Image: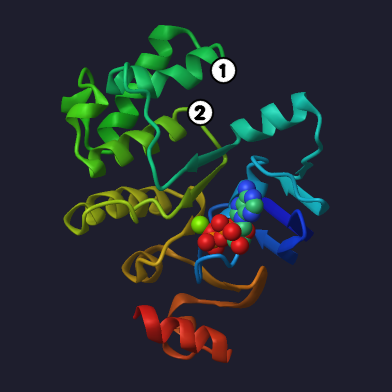
Amino acid sequence: MIKIEGVNKWFGNLHVLKGIDLEIKEREVVVIIGASGSGKSTLLRCINFLEKAQKGDIYIDGEKMISQPKVVNRLRQEVGMVFQHFNLFPHMTVLQNVIEGPTQVKGMPKGQATELGKDLLEKVGLSDKLDTYPAMLSGGQKQRVAIARALAMQPKVMLFDEPTSALDPELVGEVLVVMEHLAKEGMTMVVVTHEMWFAKEAADRVIYMDDGKIVEQGKPDDIFSAPKNERTQAFLSQIL
Ligand code: ADP
Ligand code: MG
């Protein structure tokens, strides 16, 4: 579903991604861990073409990302992204936030988008908040709306960049549960998170990044209980 070949990214002189090779299969759930500054967000942003890698290739479902507006726009629609900060439209209700993408970008008829939006908001447990404005929601609820909004574009892949790290601890679980359901339904997901519970429950594979490189990867149990690389060991000893 995603193929990344020899991806390198520089910000000026700063070499941020140093030759990333990665294949993610359909229905696979991959968790990326690593210290702050190791390049996790940049990698996700390259997969979604929010950043352009200077070297290397990225394929989404077999199609190569090239910097042609038509191709970028189409492939971007296939890759949903959820950020640490939810960026909901404050002047729109929850339902309006969710149907904005499908109606404005995809040209879906409003009635159909509304049905889809209601289904998705039910899925994330917010059926009773359709007409509420974001300001009235908790952080966990806002993030669940953001997930429904990304799903409304009917993407083939969902990327999550530390979706719970801005939340109060008691709100983290409700977001992770929604993500776990999505994983169980077979969504292809790449998740940057340090929530080990989620990695253990939902991930098929955990990837440890350090200094712009993939240093180690494997099944969650193997990585957490017996990391081979000493940098992985040192990192895990800090967060576990
Ligand atoms: P992570 O998500 O693992 O914390 P990032 O991908 O955000 O790491 O950042 C990797 C490196 O790239 C860091 O050194 C960061 O300061 C730098 N960086 C990220 N975005 C930019 C940018 N837009 N311009 C310049 N440097 C950036
Ligand atoms: Mg980051």
C-alpha distance separating marks 1 and 2 = 9 Å
Is the residue 213 above or below the residue 185 in the image?
A: below
Q: Position of residue 209 (x, y in %)?
A: 59, 71
- Kind of residue at disc 1: Val
Q: Residue 50: in sight, yes or no?
A: yes
* Residue at 29 percent of width and 30 percent of height: 121
Looking at the rendering, in which quadrant would you find the C terminus?
Answer: bottom left
* Residue at 42 percent of width and 53 percent of height: 183
Q: Position of residue 232 (x, y in %)?
A: 52, 84
* Residue situated furthest front in the rendering: 13
The answer as to whether callout 1 falls within 8 Å of ligand 1 is no
What residue is disc 1 on? 105
Q: Residue 40: in sight, yes or no?
A: no
- Kind of residue at disc 2: Met
Crowd rating for badge 2 (residues with CA inside 10 Å; few <14, some 14–19, many 20+) = many
In the drawing, what numbered circle is on residue 209?
A: none
Is the residue 239 above or below the residue 74 in the image?
A: below
Is the residue 24 above or below the residue 215 in the image?
A: above
**First in residue order: circle 1 vs circle 2:** 1
Disc number lying in front (1 or 2): 1
Q: Dots 1 and 2: beta carbons under 8 Å?
A: yes
* Residue at 42 percent of width and 8 percent of height: 110
Q: Position of residue 23 (x, y in %)?
A: 68, 61
Which of 136/141 is in front? 136
What residue is disc 2 on? 153
